[in-house]
Image (cartoon, grey):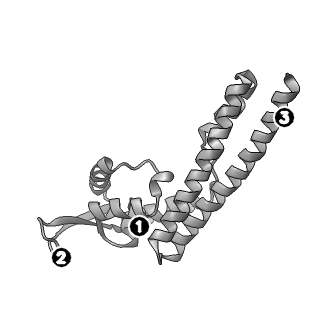
Amino acid sequence: MLSLVVECPRHAYEIERVIAERGMRDWTDVGFSSIYSVLGKMERVGLVEGRRDDTGSKGPARKVYSPTGEGFLAWTEASLTALSTPQAKMPFLLGLTNLAWLPQDRALEAARACHKTLDERLLEVREKRRAAGEVEWSVGEAFDYSEQSLLSGRDWVAGFVVRLEQRSRESR
């Protein structure tokens, strides 16, 4: 969320809209109900400042958040750390490590389901990118990374399914 207010000052509903439009829920754990809570915490620790803005609003004034100097520095360091730290945080890896002890037929069924899910997510990312239209180049890079990660994962899982099928045939 700090990244979104560093891009430009935003109110909570606009943050929600951008999160949804960019498909950020695919790779973040930010629910709509937690947006106000997180913004409040960031304001209390001095990372953002909120100001009431009633310009252009039909209803009550909305609180628009902007980064503080400290917030901008924290965002910069966290962004550089994130950019330099690849992570493989898939529960799928846990399933792989436990594969030898799972029933083969159910493991194969699960792997096929994973492949189908990756196909569906790939279509969703492509649709969200198309729907987003013209975006900042860095947002385009995030879409590209998501698409390429899904393609790579889907292709690996397709090969994994073939290997499981072969293993299953050999063990009969």
Q: Which mark is residue 166?
A: 3
171 sits left or right of 78 in the view: right
**Label placed on residue 56:** 2
Q: Classify mark 3: residues with Cα within 10 Å, few (<14), some (14-19) or many (20+).
A: few
Q: Amino acid at mark 2?
A: Gly
Looking at the rendering, which quadrant does residue 11 occupy?
Answer: bottom left
> What residue lies at 65% left-to-right and 61% top-to-bottom?
148
Alpha carbons under labels 1 and 2: distance apart? 27 Å
Mark 1: few/some/many CA within 10 Å (<14, 14-19, 20+):
some
Q: Earlier in the sequence, mark 1 or mark 2?
A: 2
> Does the residue at mark 1 contact the one at mark 2 (Cβ under 8 Å)?
no
Residue 50 spot, x, y in % from top left: 23, 64
Question: Which circle's residue, 2 or 3, is located before the other in the chain?
Answer: 2
Q: How many marks?
A: 3
Spatial CA span between label 1 and label 3: 53 Å
Closer to viewer: mark 1 or mark 2? 2
Quarter of the image for residue 71 reads bottom left
Residue labelled with disc 1: 72
Q: Secondary structure at mark 2?
A: loop
Q: CA distance from mark 2 to mark 3?
A: 62 Å
- Please, what is the three-letter code of the amino acid marked with disc 1? Phe
Viewport quadrant of the C terminus:
top right
Task: Say above or below: 161 vs 61.
Answer: above
> What residue sits 46% from the left and 59% below the top?
23
The kind of residue on which mark 3 rests is: Gln
